[in-house]
Every structure is written in C-alpha cells, then in structure tokens.
Amino acid sequence: MNEFQKARLKLTAWYILICFILLAISNIAALNAEKTAFNRILQVVSNKKTRPHVTELFQTYITDFEKNFRIRLFYFDGILLVFATWSAYFLSGVTLKPIQKMVKLQDEFAADASHELRTPLTTMSMEIVALKRTEKKIPDKYLRVLTSIEEEIGRMRNIVDGLLTLVRYSNNSFRQNWKRFDLTDLAKEAFEQMKPFAANKKIAYSFSTPTDFSVNAIGSRDQIKQVLLILLDNAIKYTPQKGTIHLLIKKQNHTVFAEVKDSGFGIPQEDQHKIFERFYRGRYASKYYEKGSGIGLAIAKRIINNYNGSIGVKSEAGKGSEFFFELPAAA
C-alpha cells in the first residue's frame, strides 16, 4: 500500500466518522420526534371521554407504527452509511489527486535527475582514474585532493542509485519476480558477502538460526537480500574495531524474522523515530563514523513496507543496536 492509498483511507475514515456523527444526531432527533408524537397520543388516550373510542383503535396502530418506524430507520441508516462510505472514498480521492500528481511529478523528477547525474559522475571518476595512471609525478597534495574528489564522487553515485531505488520501489514494479524463497539461505549469502568487510575491522561476526526447517517467504530474493546487505553494512560501518555483530533468522507464528545485532555506540532514543527517514543521519553516525548517504535505511523500510511487513530498531546509547524486520511467512 503506497502513501497515497494510506492517506486516502485515513481521509475516508474521517469522512465516515463525520457522517456517523451526523447520522447519530439525526437518529436522536427522529427518536425524540417519535417520543413527542406518542406523548401527544397518550394525552388523547388519557382523556376519559375519548378513551373508550380511541384506545382500541390506537393500540393496533401504535404497535405497527413503532415496529415499522424502527425497521425503516434501520434500513435508512444502512443505506446512508453505504452511500456515505462510497462518497467519502470518492471525495477523498478527488481531494488527494493533486497531491498524488505532485508526488508523482516529484518521483519522475528524482528519476530523471538521477539518470542525468550518472553520466557526468562516471565521466569524472574515469578521468581521475586515467589521470592517476598516466601521470606518474603527481604531487602528494594534489593526489590527496584527487582521492578526496574520487571518494565524494563515489558517495554521490551511491545517493543517485539510492534515489533511483526509492523511485522504483514506490510504484508497482516492486511486485515483479515474486517467488517463494528460503530466508535462511538468502541470509547466509548476504552474510558471506559482507564477511570480508567485517574481517577488515576484526569484528566477531556470527550467524545463527534456531531451527533446521526452512524459513520460507514470498517475494523478490534480490530485494530482501538488499535489505539484509543494508543492515549488515550499517552494522559493520557503525561498529568499532573488535566489536561484535550477530545475524539471526527465525520463524515465529505466521511471520519470518531477521535481526542484526551489533555492539556499536547505539542510537539515542530521540533519534530512533527518524532513523528510517531519507538522508537522516544520527549524531553518532555523523561524528564518529565514516561518511554515508543516509538513504540505505529508507530503502530498506520502503521494501519491507511493500511486503506488508514491519521494520524497526531497538537501541540504547552506548549499548549497541538491534535492527530487525518481519515478513509474512509463506504457506
């Protein structure tokens, strides 16, 4: 479910609530009118002179009227609620359509800009590499500048690729190539792929699963593997030398569960609700660790949300972090 559908459903719920309140007010007014009418009838009936003539006649009409009135009121309420729900959904779509169009244009702009930026970034990177290979006597101060520029170009390329990924996963293309797969096997692949980077920092790097059975999910292996690589890369990047990282895969009830636990400096409580936003980097990330794009966790969240799963973090400053996600298990 994309952001437009979520907003539309929320707005629909508000419309229905307003209709329900108006309906309740109208029902109270109708019931009060019924009560007033019957009180007037009772006054006539209570008159000793007219009572013998009207009592028998009104008794039948009162019973039938009260029964029919409530049945008609019930049907009227039902029809009105159905109409109000349809109208609310339609009106919310009309209300949000300009916003949806704006978001679509924004995504198209991000995609177009990212495509256009790729070429000059690649050209600059290749020219720097060619310059380093052909020029043997580059002064050290210039070499340091060229190396710094090359690193920044690499970081910009990662941001561009991240923006393209976010745009791609914001539409229905994420549903392509969905298949049944074993999350345990996929996690082992991602774990082994990141192992050399952990070894470079002498990190105690481990993997476990509490069951010998397959932990199956349905979706795109490449997308879920990308989420695992993002979480493992962040854990390695933000864990100091000789720290620990543990990857856990398990099945619980009707979901599959993955967790990456590290012994880094952790994330302060006030930063945790923003950690999955685009380009947001916490204070510890900016102060103590290497540079990053701040877009990886936003991509991970977009992918997991597209699977109707959940992703989150448990952390405390100075005590490491636990990033985890859950997905519906395959039947």
Image (cartoon, rainbow, N blue to C red):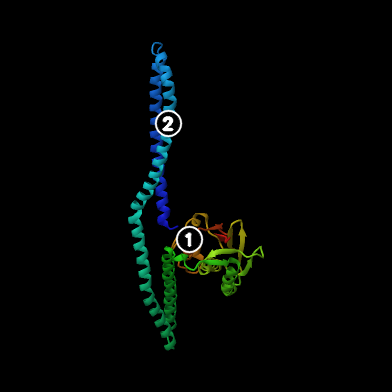
Q: Nearer the viewer, residue 110 or 77?
A: 77
Q: How many marks?
A: 2
Q: Which residue is mark 2?
A: 68
User: In this image, 244 relative to 284: left or right?
Assistant: right
Residue 238, how many percent across, how many down? Answer: 54, 66
**Between discs 1 and 2, the one toward the N terminus:** 2
Residue 130, x across and y down, in percent: 42, 85
- Residue 236, percent from left and from top: 56, 68
Location of mark 1 (residue):
306
Q: Residues within 10 Å of mark 2 (few under 14, many from 20)?
A: few
User: Up-down: is 195 above or below 213?
Assistant: below
What label sits on residue 98 in the rendered view?
none
Amino acid at circle 1: Asn
Q: Residue furthest top?
A: 49
> Is 120 placed above or below 28 here?
below
Q: Indicate the amino acid at tag 2.
A: Asn
Tell me the SS state at disc 1.
helix
Picture layout, residue 220 above or below residue 90 = below
Dividing the image into 4 quarters, which one contains the C terminus?
bottom right
Q: Secondary structure at mark 2?
A: helix
Viewer can see residue 320: no
**Frontmost residue, 159 versus 265:** 159
The residues tagged by marks 1 and 2 sit, at their Cα atoms, a distance apart of: 49 Å
Left/right placement of residue 210 relative to residue 231 reads: right
